[in-house]
Image (cartoon, rainbow, N blue to C red):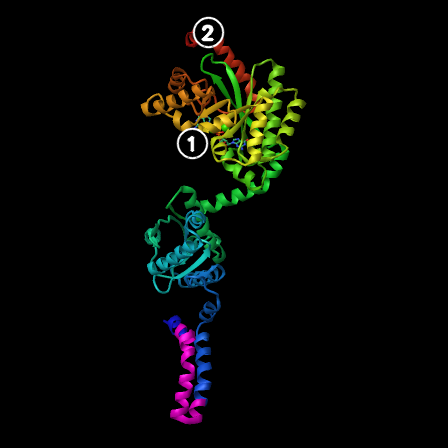
Amino acid sequence: MRMRIFNVLTGPPALAFIPAFSLAAYWFGGEGALLVVAALLPAIYLLAGGINGTVGHLNSAAMTRGGLLPRAAMAERCGVIFEQASESGMHSCIHVVEIEGFADLVDRFGPAAGDAVIDRMGERLTAAMRDGDVIGQIGDARFAVCVSPVRHLSLELCIQLAGRLQTAAEEPISLDGTVIYADVCIGFCQHSRAPDKQAAQWLEAACIALRSAQARGASSIRAYSDQMHQERKTRRALHEDVFAALDSGEITPWFQPQICTDTGRITGFEALARWTHPVRGVIPPAEFLPAVEAANLLERLAEVMMYHSFRALKAWDTEGVEVPQVGVNFAGSELSNPRLLEKIKWDLDRFELTPDRLAVEVLETVVASAPDDMITRNINALGALGCRIDLDDFGTGNASIASIRRFSVCRIKIDRSFVMKADRDPEQQRMISAILTMAERLQVETLAEGVETVGEHVLLAQLGCDHVQGFGIARPMPFDQTIDWINAHNAKLLDVPQIMQGRQK
Ligand code: C2E
Ligand code: CA
Ligand code: CA
């Protein structure tokens, strides 16, 4: 109410009436009345602004297009509400709502449509909340909603509120005859769950919950938990340490064997990055690759992985065990290095290895997304040099048949999603058969990834898949264990020659 009075008194309409007020005072009361009005008006302004510092402050903060508070003012208001709730023992909550794929939406429909969507979103969120609640726009397509302190606000009520905000936000938006559908994710943090009971971290915590919701997929809602805080701290620590870890040899490849379905012989190993952390133990790539990427160190990782892989090949050769090749993963950006070819040539020379000992594993998504000239040139140059090109995660990235040809792919690695339960699921079998037929026509070899059971292994061999790799054969292992594993595997082959011969084509 105070806010409304203040708005009326200070807004443009009130200013329009000042001359009329003054004139009327002069006509009806003479100079005395005019003096009173002249003294009274500034006093009213001062009083209205002075009733509560924040009101004056709020008005002075520039509003966003839709009349919402901008980020700094929003953070300040959240701070005030946090203190009020803490002092009164009441409850509150911040919800952060973000429109997914907003940049794409602007690309598709234009900036004016983007503005209109933001305006509409602001109106809807405002309409979904009560008068005293505070609403701000804290990013291009990100809004924050802070509930003014209330007596009861359980986790369940917060989830319901998030659902209400989401329903309102995801209503289709009609613009000039076009209907726009926007997905929103929501993260929220209750007042009682703010990290370290600090106002400053409350809004940030809701943003962390939002990121966690976004990682789960479209239209997700997540509540902030201490565990998220912990995970974030750990990720930050990894970010700081990753550089040193690459240099100190804490990050090295573990090796997973690939075997021929006809002969059972080892046809190669895939090098998979592992970080042997002094405190946290062995960390899988899913946890540290984002840190490597964020630190722009993917190129350095590829260098480290190749160096250790070549060293392993040399060691296997010296030991007299046969390992034809090692597959090294390239995520994409490493392949845009103009000096990549020279570097690989130099490393191969240094270890006196022929290029066919290296299989360059390129994700199907990289090949499919019309990569820049440098990536195309590098893959082709590596192929021309004699390195083998493996198309990784095949079936998940929409690579065209043309791109399989264009990049001289030697082998496709059929993604684990097709292999899972293949021995019991006819639909999976049909998909695998289709991929194998295509590969045969294109004269590329095939490897099935993630083979976990004997049943899957046998089926893939029957369908004619050339190679298999997976936990069913062996899990990735440190280099030190590979020679024992190879010897044991080869010994098993010698024990059952008749079975393997029976399977030979
Ligand atoms: P990827 O290239 O598809 O590697 C196969 C992943 O599947 C590996 O996970 C492997 O441990 C796992 N795997 C193998 N057999 C089975 C199985 O039978 N069942 C199941 N459930 N999983 C199996 P990992 O080592 O955690 O690597 C994950 C991803 O990280 C790799 O997927 C690859 O994309 C990436 N990565 C690993 N090392 C590197 C690297 O040096 N550089 C880059 N850029 N990416 C790497
Ligand atoms: Ca791979
Ligand atoms: Ca793969």
Residue 25 point in image, percent of width and height: 40, 89
Q: Secondary structure at mark 1?
A: loop
Closest to the camera, between mark 1 and mark 2, is 1
Give amino acid for label 1: Thr
Residue 311 point in image, percent of width and height: 62, 23
Q: Which residues are magenta?
A: 7-34
Give amino acid for label 2: Pro
Dominant secondary structure, magenta? helix
Label 2 near ligand 1 (CB < 8 Å): no
Q: Nearer the viewer, residue 81 or 357?
A: 357
Q: Quadrant of residue 84?
A: bottom left
Q: Is residue 491 above or below residue 445?
A: above
Q: Which mark is residue 396?
A: 1
Quadrant of the snapshot with the C terminus: top left
The residue under label 2 is 497
Classed neighbour count for the residue bearing mark 1: other residues with Cα under 10 Å, few (<14), some (14–19), many (≥20): some
Circle nearer the N terminus (1, 2): 1
Report if residue 277 is visible in the image: no
